[in-house]
Image (cartoon, helix red, strand yellow):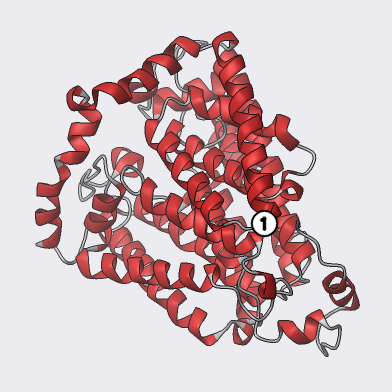
Amino acid sequence: MLADANFSMELFLLLAMVLPAWVMASIDAPALVPCLSAVGALGPEIRRLNDWGGGYYQSVTILSLIPSAATGSLLIPVLRHLSRIPAETRKSAVMVLMPLCYGTMMGVLLNGLGGLVEGLGFVLPFLFAFYAASQPYVESHRSRWLRTYFLVSVVVALYGWYQYFTAPPWDMLWMMGSRMYTSVGKPEPMAFRPFSTLGAPLALGMFLAMALVIGICSRKWRGLGGILGMFIMSTCLLISLDRTVWIVLAAAVATLTLFSKGKYRWMSIGAITILSTAVYLLLPLLPGADAVNARMASFANLNNDASTQARVGILGTLVYAATDPLGHGFGSNGVSAKLADTNAAVNMGSDSGFLDVCTTLGMPMTLMVTIGVIRLARQAIKPSAVSESDAKGRTPFNVLAAAMTVAWLVSMLSYDTLGGAGGVLLWLSIGCPIGCKTASRIESGRSSYMPREFARSARLSEYS
């Protein structure tokens, strides 16, 4: 009886979080992406609260599907407007989607439910690129998508600090049940690396780093958060104590500065200068500063660092991955493998995103997905006919796509960012510069199938 009541509550929470997204998708509501940004970031925390309320930890529940079930609503507008997507974009997208679907099927066959959950976490975020490419190139709407994600990231960072100070019992229950304590720390206030509403400190750091790139790229994308929001995210990113994320952020910011032109470059440099100065001056006053300084000092002694040497040592393991062209499917590494209920699941996890992809998909599919991502990124970085600013050079959307692509490549040294919350930001950033093939008629307000408000918004485009 108690089990039935618990399942009913889980089902109610799932529908309450997911149904609004499906309703918005069915009517092509512009608020769909903002809704998905909130559900994707907060959904895992709902699951932890439910476990805590029930008094026990569950490795897999239907609430684990909240982000995937909500993101699946993008299938409605994508399939409805599939013909609008440029042909070259469709070809590149298939090169990414096929390996991800293959990895999901292999994961289900070899690793059971864990393979399905993890596979959906990689396949469904890719729909954001499809969705953006199928929608009219209305800059105000695309700016709203990015602005919403920035604000959600500020909320995630704020909760990360709250979690660090208080060690909420629902989060500690999940940390102990998932055996995250082996790498995160003790379940005590200020004795662990925060993971906020996401699944790990590395996932949190990558999500915040990508959101910071959005805020640095354009002032209007910061919204109400502004420089203060960027400072909150920066400090939360620092106490995650993940060096790879710091390197990813530095590489993305360098790319952003290199690709920007004119006033956008100077605005980006100004934001970077203000943010860096604030963090440098206030870091010694923040809790956890000693741990951050010690972590930064480790850059000077990488030869004796176990994590660095482990990444160097994976080159030999790549030979093994090349001899196994089929791969082990999703759910064969990381937390999914640890929590697997079947004996078929083998923890193939490593300290490298590239190796994780190779062992998951097999070498042929890994090459295909890599080529597909690079092709999509090239189309996103190149100015296209749908943007009014092409005559003056790249728009901030093109620059953001370039920075996110570099962030993805660098992050793969440690972490596969094609899925999860970081994957959503990657695919959305790549999709934003790509508009549907009839966007030029929509911009001029002569579209025969678009609502009138889209045409008005197109004439009033803004994103500086």
Report if residue 38 is visible in the image: no
Q: For the point 32% across and 50% down, which residue is it?
A: 331
Residue 114 place in picture, x, y as percent? 36, 49
Quadrant of the frame with the N terminus: top right
Q: Is residue 174 left or right of residue 208?
A: left
Q: Is residue 260 above or below residue 457?
A: above
Q: How many labels does the image show?
A: 1
**Which of the 4 image quarters holds residue 434?**
bottom right
**Which of the 4 image quarters holds residue 9?**
top right
Q: In this view, does 181 lie to the left or right of 390?
A: left
Report if residue 145 is visible in the image: yes
Residue 168 place in picture, x, y as percent? 58, 18
Q: What residue type is labelled 1?
A: Gly
Q: In this view, does 322 lie to the left or right of 137?
A: left
Q: For the point 65% across and 85% down, which residue is it?
A: 437
Given residues 242 and 198, the one toward you in this image is 242
Q: For the point 54% across and 51% down, which residue is it?
A: 256
Q: Is residue 353 above or below residue 91?
A: above
Q: Name the residue under label 1.
A: 262
Q: For the point 65% across and 76% down, which residue is it?
A: 435
Residue 322 place in picture, x, y as percent? 13, 61
Q: In this view, does 292 lie to the left or right of 315?
A: right
Residue 192 place in picture, x, y as percent? 44, 17
Assess disc 1: are there few (<14), some (14-19) or many (≥20) residues with their C-alpha within 10 Å of its C-alpha.
few
Given residues 132 and 38, the one toward you in this image is 132
